[in-house]
Image (cartoon, rainbow, N blue to C red):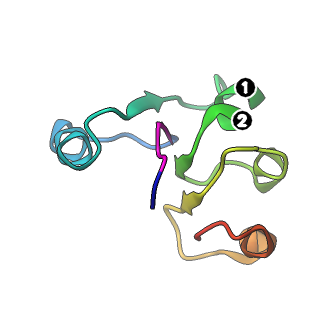
Amino acid sequence: MTNINQILAYFPLTDDHKETIKSLLPDVTIHEVRWPNLAQADVDAADVVFGNIPANMLDAAPNLKWVHLSSAGTDGYMHLLDRGIVL
């Protein structure tokens, strides 16, 4: 996975999680947001999304490369695979 500059975390990350991510991607920005503060601009800026953001918000995200869901249900997200996004 290359060119990951912006991670959007829609679930809480521990300090250990953040340290691990930063050790692997030192230049990445981690943006944590919770409902109801999630904005389309947050999603559009993300290269990686951690969490179950409403699938329709991901449809137009121009930089999206990877979506890591926090649950096993992927039905509403499968269409992202057609764009080459890792799910």
Name the residue at 52% across, 68% down: 71
Q: Relative to residue 34, is residue 24 depicted above or below?
A: below
| Label at residue 44 | 2
Image quarter (top left, top right, bottom left or bottom right) of the C terminus: bottom right
Magenta part of the chain: 3-8
Whole-percent x, y for residue 26 in the image: 25, 36
Whole-percent x, y for residue 46 in the image: 59, 39
How crowded pointer 1 is (Cα within 10 Å; few <14, some 14-19, many 20+) is rated as few
Q: Nearer the viewer, residue 82 or 14?
A: 82
Whole-percent x, y for residue 1 in the image: 45, 61
How crowded pointer 2 is (Cα within 10 Å; few <14, some 14-19, many 20+) is rated as some
Residue 38 is left or right of residue 80, and the answer is left
Asked if residue 36 is among those painted magenta in the image, a careful observer would answer no
* Quadrant in which residue 28 is drawn: top left
Q: Can you identify the residue that label 1 sits on?
A: 41
Name the residue at 56% across, 60% down: 66
* Amino acid carrying mark 2 in the image: Asp
* Amino acid carrying mark 1 in the image: Ala
* Quadrant in which residue 19 is drawn: top left
Dots 2, 1 in contact, CB < 8 A: yes
Residue 41 is left or right of residue 72, and the answer is right
